[in-house]
Image (spheres, grey):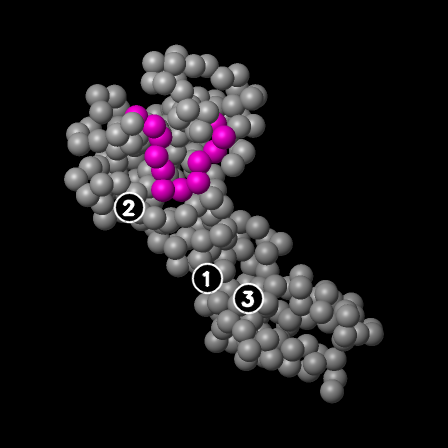
């Protein structure tokens, strides 16, 4: 079989078995291992060769990360588009301050609401009524209680899309802009916020997701000490990354 036909067959074979994207980088490595690529006398790159087979085959690239390129046969474009969308949602969620994420997923009693402080230091609060300082309710229809977000990438694609869409819709509903969460370096916020004022009846922090060493440090202190405790930024940042 001519090398070009071998390349086409490998693409078709992948999608006959898998519904996951065939990355150009991985495909090139596979072809090299099988001595199908490079083709003797071919001066074009593998990308150019595949694009030359249009419309039967194409390479769809992430506009925000051109190195992420998916090889697809005609009719499988949605697999590539979905993978690119998920990458974008992951990047969006991972860039948000953690208290913002937690405000959408933390479990709460049915008679309580979650309010998010929308200016640094970002915090969420669980209460019967809105706190006095600037905060906005996280409407129940946008919350995804119980989602585990220790690592965004550990969520399945459906949950990633659902959470991402809910946050964007909430921002739009309350006439906010996403850039409020990205101004400046959030290191100081992470260092001093302890992520939430959520408390149990014993006035200790209680989250349905894993806590960091920083949260546990604050939770272990009596309220009067915790409210006055100051942790150096460099130490607090390290503690906020420890679980």
Check disc 3: other Cα within 10 Å, few if <14, some if 14-19, many if 20+. Answer: many
| Residue range corresponding to the magenta coloring | 203-214
Residue indicated by mark 3: 21
Question: Which label was assigned to residue 82?
Answer: 1
Q: Secondary structure at mark 1?
A: helix
- Let me know if residue 204 is in the magenta part: yes
Q: Where in the figure is residue 145, as x and y percent of width and height? A: 31, 47
- First in sequence: mark 1 or mark 3? 3
Horizontally, residue 81 falls left or right of residue 222, namely: right
Question: Which label was assigned to residue 202?
Answer: none
Q: Where in the figure is residue 166, as x and y percent of width and height? A: 31, 48
Q: Secondary structure at mark 3?
A: loop
Q: Quadrant of residue 108?
A: top left
- Residue at (58, 64) in percent of width and height: 70
- Residue at (17, 40) in percent of width and height: 111
Q: Nearer the viewer, mark 2 or mark 1?
A: 2
Question: Which label was assigned to residue 143?
Answer: 2
Q: Residue furthest bottom?
A: 1
Q: Secondary structure at mark 2?
A: loop
> Foreground: 128 or 35?
128
In the rendered image, the vertical position of residue 42 relative to residue 166, given as above or below: below
- First in sequence: mark 2 or mark 3? 3
Overall secondary structure of the magenta section: loop
Cα–Cα span, label 1 and label 3? 9 Å
> Foreground: 14 or 98?
98
Q: Where in the figure is residue 171, as x and y percent of width and height? A: 30, 40
Q: Answer whether residue 136 is visible to the viewer in this image.
A: no
Considering the image in quadrants, where does the N terminus appear?
Answer: bottom right
Cα–Cα span, label 2 and label 1? 23 Å
Q: Nearer the viewer, mark 2 or mark 3?
A: 2
């Amino acid at each position: 079989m001519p090398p070009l036909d071998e390349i086409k067959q490998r693409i078709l074979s992948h999608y006959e078995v898998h519904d996951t994207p065939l990355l150009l980088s991985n495909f090139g490595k596979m072809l090299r291992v099988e001595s199908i690529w490079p083709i003797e006398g071919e001066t074009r790159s593998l990308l150019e060769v595949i694009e030359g087979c249009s419309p039967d085959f194409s390479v769809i690239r992430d506009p925000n990360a051109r190195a992420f390129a998916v090889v697809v046969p005609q009719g499988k474009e949605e697999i590539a588009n979905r993978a690119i969308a998920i990458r974008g949602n992951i990047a969006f969620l991972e860039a948000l301050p953690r208290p913002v994420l937690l405000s959408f997923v933390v479990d709460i009693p049915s008679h309580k609401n979650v309010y998010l402080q929308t200016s640094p230091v970002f915090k969420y609060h669980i209460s019967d009524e809105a706190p006095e300082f600037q905060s906005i309710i996280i409407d129940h229809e946008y919350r995804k209680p119980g989602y585990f977000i220790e690592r965004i990438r550990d969520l399945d694609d459906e949950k990633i899309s659902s959470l991402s869409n809910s946050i964007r819709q909430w921002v739009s509903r309350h006439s906010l802009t996403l850039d409020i969460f990205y101004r400046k370096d959030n290191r100081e916020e992470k260092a001093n916020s302890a992520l939430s004022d959520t408390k149990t009846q014993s006035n200790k922090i209680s989250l349905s997701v894993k806590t960091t060493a920083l949260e546990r440090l604050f939770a272990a202190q009596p309220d009067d000490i915790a409210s006055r405790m100051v942790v150096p930024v460099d130490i607090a940042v390290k503690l906020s990354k420890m679980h």
